[in-house]
Image (spheres, rainbow, N blue to C red):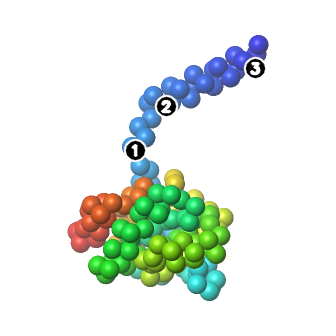
Amino acid sequence: ALPLIALAALALLFGLFALKHDPRVEPQALVGKPTPDLVLPSLDDGRPVRLRDAAKGPVLVNIFASWCAPCEIEQPVLVALKARGVPLVGIAYKDAPDNTKAFLNRLGDPFTTRLVDRDGRAGIELGVTGVPETYLVGADGVILAKHTGPLTEQDATDLWAKAAR
């Protein structure tokens, strides 16, 4: 009986949290702060790349994965951004490099720099809550905005417009 009471109490606690939790709230912990000083391997040749050097702004940093269905939906928007001259840094999150390469070969590669976060540690530093996520980094290296979920054309336009402010 005691385990059932404990389970019921936990269910009630989580239920109350869910009622008060707004799922539309996006954690913006890094907005207004410098890009984390991370070093990640390049997808191209495995050499270490400092994110702060790769993300000299204004630039969009996109966290994606080949196993992520919303990332597939977003990919044409990123390819269109590249065609408009928007610089993009891609970070493959918890993904096998061969799978990432196949994903980019199949759907188009919009990235000027391709990095690998195989174990997800960089994602923790960046505050990633799920993929895809896109960060706008300003000319001074400060994160100006974060978008969670797949970018639509309008989202991309709105996000990139913040770089001009």
Q: Nearer the viewer, residue 37 or 99?
A: 99
The residue that appears at 66% across and 64% down in the rendered structure is 119
Amino acid at dot 2: Ala
Q: Is residue 117 left or right of residue 163?
A: right
Amino acid at dot 1: Val
- Mark 1 is surrounded, within 10 Å at the Cα level, by few (under 14), some (14 to 19) or many (20 or more) other residues, namely few
Q: The residue tagged with tag 2: helix, strand or loop?
A: helix
Residue 143: x percent and y percent?
Answer: 39, 66
Cα–Cα gap, marks 1 and 2: 13 Å
Cα–Cα gap, marks 3 and 2: 22 Å
Amino acid at dot 3: Pro
The residue that appears at 27% across and 66% down in the rendered structure is 157
Q: Which mark is residue 18?
A: 2
Residue 58 in view of the camera: no
Q: The residue tagged with tag 1: helix, strand or loop?
A: loop
* Tag 1 residue: 25
Residue 83 in view of the camera: yes
Q: Which mark is residue 87?
A: none
* Tag 3 residue: 3
Q: The residue tagged with tag 3: helix, strand or loop?
A: helix
The residue that appears at 37% across and 61% down in the rendered structure is 151
Residue 101: x percent and y percent?
Answer: 57, 77
